[in-house]
Image: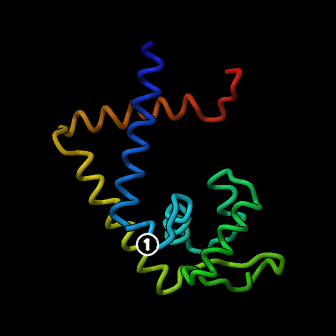
Amino acid sequence: MENESMANTVFAIAHSYRLAMRAALKANETGLNAMHVKCLAFIEKQQSCTANDIVNHFHRDKGQIARLIKEMLDKKWLNKSAHPKDKRSYLLSLSAEGKMLAARITEAQNHIQKKMQKNLSAEELQEFTRIAGIISANLEGAGAAD
């Protein structure tokens, strides 16, 4: 029963976080989804970013990432330019609109993080981070048979 409780807690936190982010970003109005948010934040932090970088970082299917990038290009959140070293590839960067959206995402994440940390001591936050890191490491590469 304890394992079920732990899984329920993880799902509840993830679900609450996702709902808070959607509300803060007015995601329904802008057409944002969780992968848009993750990709925009990832691209913003990269010196140079290719579709393959996104595939490798998020461990997602190439087709899914290609569709996601096309959608973000159509929404004018991204710019695409020729890769100077690899003619088969292209570099992605945030457009002016993408930069504004990324700034809104960062602001929303900071606000929600403060809300999540409310009523927790520095020691409790440190312990939570430590334990969550262990749980995450335990699940890395884990298959159904583990």
**Which residue lies at the image location 78% right of the left edge and 75% below the top edge?**
89
Q: Is residue 20 above or below residue 136?
A: below
**Which residue lies at the image location 43% right of the left edge and 24% below the top edge?**
6
**Which residue lies at the image location 35% right of the left edge and 59% below the top edge?**
109
Q: Is residue 2 above or below residue 12?
A: above
Residue 80: image location, x then y, percent: 66, 83
Residue 37: image location, x then y, percent: 49, 63
Residue placed most toward the observer, 136 or 116? 116
What quarter of the picture does the N terminus occupy?
A: top left
Q: Is residue 74 above or below residue 18?
A: below
What quarter of the picture does the C terminus occupy?
A: top right
**Which residue lies at the image location 40% right of the left edge and 37% below the top edge?**
12
Residue 5: image location, x then y, percent: 41, 21
Find disc 1 in the rendering and name its residue: 29
Check disc 1 and report its element: helix, strand or loop.
helix
What residue type is disc 1 on? Glu
